[in-house]
Amino acid sequence: MDWPCWRLPWLGSYLSLKDRIEQNRFVLWLVFLSFPLPFIAILTGWYTAEVGRQPWVVYGVLRTAEAMTPFLDGARGVDLACRWIERPHLFVFPVIGGLAAVVLAVSIRYRRDQSPFPMVILIFLSAFGTLAISFWPYMIPFVLTIDEAAAPHSSLVFMFWGEGLFVFPLMLLYTVISYRVFRGKVASMPGHY
C-alpha cells in the first residue's frame, strides 16, 4: 500500500517534467488504477484499529463499551439523520454535487474540455460542504463546538488588530514593491507557461 501512495506521484511528476508521461501508457494505467488506494488505506487502518482492540476485550482488560469507537454508536447516527430530516436545506450541497457530476459526465461524453476540471472542483466543494454542514457547529463531531475550540476573545482581538493593522499591510507593501522591482525584467520562456 505504501509504494503506490507516494512513489507513483513522484514517478508521474518526474516523467511529466521530462515530457514523457504521455508516451508511458503503463504509468498512466497505474495512476488511473491507483485512485482507490487512499480509501483502501483509510479503511484498513480503521479495521486494524477496531480489530486490534478485540484481544483486550476477550482477556477482560477492556470492557466492550470501551473498545467500541465512540462515534459509531446508534444515537449519533440517529441524531445526524434527524438533522437532515429537520433541515431540508441541507440537501443543497448534495444536489449541487449531483448536478456537477451529471455535467461532468455529459462534458466527457461530448468532449467539452473546458468543463471537467471546474465540475470536479465543484463536486469536491459540495462534498466538503455536505460534511461541514452536517456536523455544524461541531469541530469534533458531537464533542467540541467551534466556540469551545476558539481562542479566548482577547487573543482573537489581538490577532485581528495586530495582524490586520500591522502585518497584513506590510505583506501588501512587500508584494507591491516586488512587482514594481521585477516588472518587465522577467520574460516567458518557450515551452513554459
Image (tube, grey):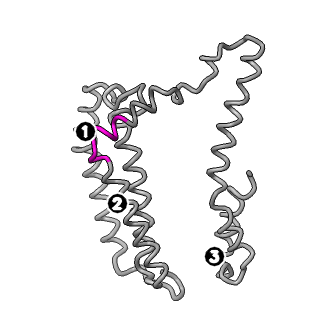
| Marks 1 and 2, how far apart at CA | 34 Å
Which three-letter amino acid code belongs to the residue tagged 2?
Ile
Residue 129: percent from the left, percent from the top? 37, 50
Q: Is mark 3 on a helix, strand or loop?
A: helix
Q: Is mark 2 on a helix, strand or loop?
A: helix
* Magenta residues, start to end: 82-90
Foreground of the two, 150 or 63: 63
The residue tagged 2 is: 96
Q: Pointer 3 and pointer 1: residues touching (CB < 8 Å)?
A: no
CA neighbours of label 2 inside 10 A, class few (<14), some (14 to 19), many (20+): some
Q: Is mark 1 on a helix, strand or loop?
A: helix
The residue tagged 1 is: 160
Which three-letter amino acid code belongs to the residue tagged 3?
Leu
The residue tagged 3 is: 17
Q: Is residue 161 above or below residue 64?
A: below
Which three-letter amino acid code belongs to the residue tagged 1?
Phe
Taking the spot 54% from the left edge, 25% from the top edge, the residue there is 70
Q: Residue 15 carries which label?
A: none
First in sequence: mark 2 vs mark 3: 3
Front of the two marks 2 and 3: 2
Is residue 179 within the magenta segment?
no
Taking the spot 47% from the left edge, 73% from the top edge, the residue there is 105
